Every structure is written in structure tokens, then in C-alpha cells.
Image (cartoon, grey):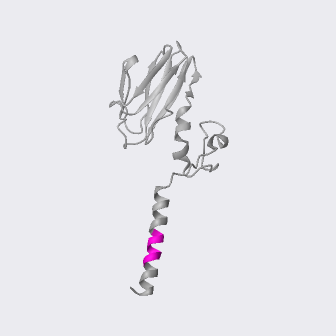
Amino acid sequence: MNRKTIIATIALLVAAVALTAFAFSPAQDCCKGAQDCCKTAQDCCKPAQNCCNPPQACCAAKRQSAAAESALQNGEQTATVEVNGEGFQPSSLRLKAGVPAKVTFVRKTDETCAKEVVIKEYNIDRKLPLNEPVTVEFTPRKGEFIFACGMDMLKGKLIVE
């Protein structure tokens, strides 16, 4: 082998080793301190805060862990749940027991199986047409209840206190 071939071979080996080390190294935790940059779960890692890249991926768990509060209007609880590529958002709702509730579901994507919503404990099974609000009405009782897509793959939770 001539000298140029040896140098080129060594350079390729060094590059291969470096790429392999990079590819198999532990993932960098871009969210170290993510809790510090997020005041509430709702504004966790908004792009303006840019505490992580991409902010959606690293803070999804924190957003999902917070239960959204329902609003009280005319003696009824109201809340809206959007069905998007991540599933039900918010993924959990906090309701008051014994107070009539109206929960509106809006499906914004065709990319998931959530084309209906089922709340077994309340005998609710409603189709969710794309971009059309569907409101389910019930009076919640104390406990935790699951709402899910018709295939029971995407799920959310009702927390009733």
C-alpha cells in the first residue's frame, strides 16, 4: 500500500469510530431543569422559552401529568378536550362530584384511532367527526374514570373530587 492509501484508510476509520461513538452514546437530556423553566404545565416549554429542543418532545410528559380544571358556568362544569396527534389534550380533567358537566371533544386530526370517545362508567359512546365539537353531558360521581377512543388505545382520565 502506498502512503496516501494508508492515510485515507486511517482517516476513514477515525471518522467511522467517531460516528459510531456519537450514534451509540447516551441521549443528551435536553430537559435538565425543564421544571425550572415552566411556571405551569400549560405553558411548559413554549417555543419562546426555548428551554429544550424540540420543546414538544421533552415536555410532553409534564403537560400530560397536569389535570386541567373545568370552568363553572351557569351551575354547570365545562371543559374542552382536543384530539390531536398526541391523543387527548388535556389528557386528564378535574371535575367536581355532583355538579352537571359538559365536556366538549374536538377531533383535529385523522392520524389517530380516536374517531369516537367512550366513557364506559357513564354509558357514553359518541362519534367524533373531524373538526366538529361533540359535547357529552353527565353528572360526575366521586372517583377516577377513563375516557378512551373506541379501540381503547388512546386514553384520558376524569378525576372527580
Image coords of residue 54 (percent x, y): 54, 51
Q: Residue at x 53, y 14 (%)?
A: 97
**Dominant secondary structure (helix, strand or loop) of the stretch shown in magenta:** helix
Does the stretch in magenta take in 42? no
Q: Which quadrant holds the C terminus?
A: top right
Q: Which quadrant holds the N terminus?
A: bottom left
Which residue of the protein is positioned furthest toward the front in this rendering? 1
Q: Residue at x 60, y 41 (%)?
A: 44
When the figure is inspected, residue 76 is found, relative to residue 81, above or below; the finding is above
What is the span of residues highlighted in magenta in the rendered image? 9-15
Q: Can you tell which quarter of the image residue 66 is in?
A: top right
Which residue of the protein is positioned furthest toward the left in this rendering? 151
User: 5 and 133: which one is in front?
Assistant: 5
Residue 122 horizontal side relative to residue 143, left or right:
left
Image coords of residue 154 (percent x, y): 40, 33
User: 86 and 127: which one is in front?
Assistant: 86
When the figure is inspected, residue 117 is found, relative to residue 25, above or below; the finding is above
Residue 78 horizontal side relative to residue 115, left or right:
right
How many labels, in total?
A: 0
Q: Can you tell which quarter of the image residue 41 is in?
A: top right
Image coords of residue 118 (percent x, y): 37, 25
Residue 48 horizontal side relative to residue 128, left or right:
right
User: 84 and 77: which one is in front?
Assistant: 84
Image coords of residue 77 (percent x, y): 54, 21
When the figure is inspected, residue 58 is found, relative to residue 99, above or below; the finding is below
User: 30 and 85: which one is in front?
Assistant: 30
When the figure is inspected, residue 52 is found, relative to residue 21, above or below; the finding is above
